[in-house]
Image (tube, rainbow, N blue to C red):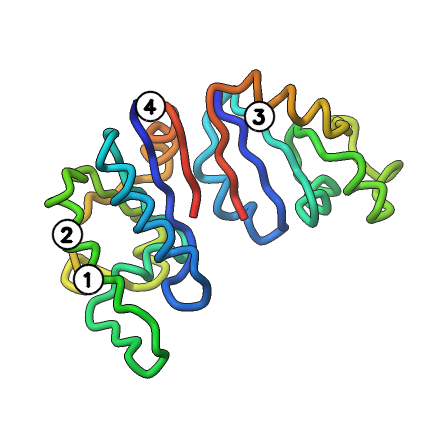
Amino acid sequence: MTLHTINKTSALALCEPHLSPGDGIVLLEDGVYLALALGRPAAAVRADAEARGLVGRLPADITLISYDEFVTLTCEADKICSWF
Amino acid sequence: MKLLFIQSKPPHGSINAQEGLDAVLMGSAFSDCTLLLTGEGVLQLIKSQDPTDLGTKDFARTFGALRDYGVNNIYADAASLERYQLSAADLVIEVETLAASEAAALIASHDKVLNF
């Protein structure tokens, strides 16, 4: 399983064609804005979402995660693919 | 260890492209390296780039050396090439083109991915 990280909204177009079934997505920094209308399950870094006023506006398939949980996800993945 | 290097930035607006290419060359010294150019990264392959007046290195020439370093698997997204109207004759080296699903499979088949 590959964990894809996206740190700005423009990077989604790069990431999307490279997703395989079962891959995970973490949204961070300005990438958390994508959580508003991503249309698929993903994790978003809570500190970044809070800073941008997004908590409470996010769909049910977005999971807010702490930095510690972010680290755990990276450890569980076979590899990380960073889109920026 | 199979390493996949993904280049997705255009060549002269940031240091990413040059750094990525240097990293591929370093990686090739000790590992099996594959290069994928996607999105604006395919613009790195355009022939006849001349950054002389920018005062930066003409690193596009490095692509021609990749095979000498044992980097034989060089791919570009077909959709990205098409977006910028690039055909094989426009490119500094011969690359294998990939459909989106094939590019995703490429990531799955490597041990580590490094994005530039």
Of all chains, the one bearing label 4 is B
Query: Mark 2 vs mark 3: same chain?
Result: no
Of all chains, the one bearing label 2 is B
Residue at (37, 56) in percent of width and height: B17
In space, the residues marked 3 and 4 are separated at their CA atoms by: 16 Å
What amino acid is found at the position of numbered circle 1 in the picture? Arg
Disc 3, SS: strand
Q: Position of residue A80 (x, y in %)?
A: 50, 30
Q: Position of residue B22 (x, y in %)?
A: 31, 50
Query: Mark 1 vs mark 4: same chain?
Result: yes
Disc nearest the viewer among 1 and 3: 1
State if disc 3 and disc 2 touch (CB < 8 Å). no
In space, the residues marked 2 and 3 are separated at their CA atoms by: 35 Å
Q: Classify 10 Å Cα crowding around label 4: few (below 14), some (14-19), many (20 and above).
A: few
- Left/right of residue A33 with respect to residue B116 in the rendered view: right
Q: Which mark is residue A24?
A: 3
Residue at (29, 26) in percent of width and height: B2
Disc nearest the viewer among 2 and 4: 2
Q: Classify 10 Å Cα crowding around label 3: few (below 14), some (14-19), many (20 and above).
A: some
Residue at (22, 43) in percent of width and height: B74
**Residue holding disc 4:** B109
What amino acid is found at the position of numbered circle 4 in the picture? Ser
- Asked where in the image residue B27 lies, by quadrant, the reply is top left
What amino acid is found at the position of numbered circle 3 in the picture? Gly
Disc 2, SS: helix
**Residue holding disc 1:** B61
